[in-house]
Amino acid sequence: MPRFRPNVAAMEAYQPGEQPPAGAKVIKLNTNECPYPPSPKVAEAIRAELDAGAAPGDRLRLYSDPGATALRQAAAEAYGFPVECVLHGNGSDELLAMLMRAFVGEGESIAYAMPTYVLYETLANAQAAKIVTFDYGRDFALPQGLFGCDAKIVFVASPNSPSGTLYAKAELERLARSLPNGVLVIDEAYVAFAESDAMELAKKLPNVVVLRTFSKSHSLAGMRLGLLFGPKDLVAGLWKVKDSYNLDRLAIAAGAASLRDPNWTAANVAKVRATRARLSKELAALGLDVLPSQANFVFARMKDAATAEGAYRFLKAQGILVRYFPAPRLRLQDGLRVSVGTDAEIDALLAKLKEYLARG
Ligand SMILES: Cc1ncc(COP(=O)(O)O)c(C=O)c1O
């Protein structure tokens, strides 16, 4: 067998949340998808793309637009950025990979606070980068160690996963200005569900990029679409490490259509936020320690790790998937992360959790 690079041989693969087969009868509250369908304009745009040309699907003979112009144009208009300051990715995951490839060499450092999105670690390991972490305290405030640290990239998910904590724009600005050589990547995958965002920093500071995804508030996790906003020169450099045709024709059409129907997305977000408030309150009433969340999920701690793991298994056996993080280094073993589903899904979850807790 050919030998992998030592860092690849030694690393663990990223473990995505469980994806049950299509048609499985489960209540899926484990990977923070939106429980409501995307804008009907999305399916219309996909159909139009398939119907264009001499025969159904004819356009698929041709490569997609490497610049995803229709999508970037719609994003530039929606967010008030020049189009040269917008880059498209196959999910924000691909944009994270591009950033890592472009900025971090072997042995160079990246930094983030723990626990957070585990993919930052996986991508750094693939790059043989040095990972510098600072532990979040129980309140999930940004650790002071991040400020002024000498890393090529500092990652902050805001709202963070799995805590749901939002970081104020002023604090993120202070962090960006404190970095001697580094890029601050503000991963705003969940920000549509929050009270405010830090997008303006990507316009104002030379070392800040903001990432957005279509997987949560746009209900398009299955299309794999992400966007990066940042200074023109920085975005131009990232193009060099981008796969040429990283978005397919259908994804480009879908993303542009969704951006052009903001009222649809806003209505879904409002429903999710209302259910989040109810879920948080009811979990607290069941005696769980619920972190205040600005995302489309809630993290709640139980009496101890055995209780939380037992709850995860019990719910799974009942056809309800939530996320349990067993890795000791994440210090999340006493909790569950529950994506905000429909009201009916959350009712089912609460009923089963109550049943589990009553069993003692
Ligand atoms: C913090 C964070 N960033 C990025 C992503 C990935 O998003 P995408 O589906 O756009 O790759 C996730 C997915 O769950 C996430 O939790």
Image: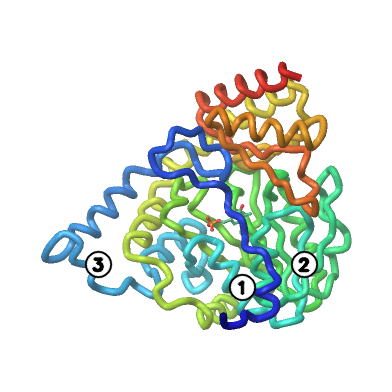
Specify few, some or many for label 1: CA neighbours under 10 Å numbering under 14, 14-19, or 20 or more: many
Number of numbered markers: 3
Circle 1/circle 3 CB separation < 8 Å: no
Q: Looking at the image, which is closer to me, 97 or 51?
A: 97
Mark 1 sits on what residue?
99
10 Å crowding of disc 2: few (<14), some (14-19), many (20+): many
Looking at the picture, which amino acid does disc 3 mark? Leu
Instruction: Pick whichever of labels 1 and 3 is earlier in the sequence.
Output: 3
Q: Nearer the viewer, residue 200 or 298?
A: 298
Q: Position of residue 155 (x, y in %)?
A: 71, 63
**Scheme by which the image is coloured:** rainbow
Q: Percent from the top left, x then y, of residue 112?
A: 76, 62
* Above/below status of 74 relative to 3: above
Residue on which the image places disc 2? 111
The tag earlier along the polypeptide, 1 or 2, is: 1
Residue depicted at x 29% and y 53%: 45
Quadrant of ligand 1: it is bottom right
Front label number (1 vs 3)? 3
Q: CB under 8 Å between callouts 1 and 2?
A: no
The type of residue carrying mark 2 is Ala
Going by the numbered disc 1, the residue's amino acid type is Leu
Q: What kind of element bears circle 2?
A: strand
Residue at x 50% of width, y 41% of height? 34
Which image quadrant is residue 336 in? top right
Q: Is residue 353 above or below residue 127?
A: above
Q: Secondary structure at mark 1?
A: helix
Respond yes or no on whether mark 3 lies under 8 Å from ligand 1.
no
Residues under labels 3 and 2: Cα distance? 41 Å
> Which residue bears the numbered disc 3?
60
Pointer 3 or 2: first along the chain: 3
Which residue corresponds to the image point at 67% horizontal and 42% vertical from the top-left? 324
Instruction: Tell me the number on the disc at residue 204.
Output: none
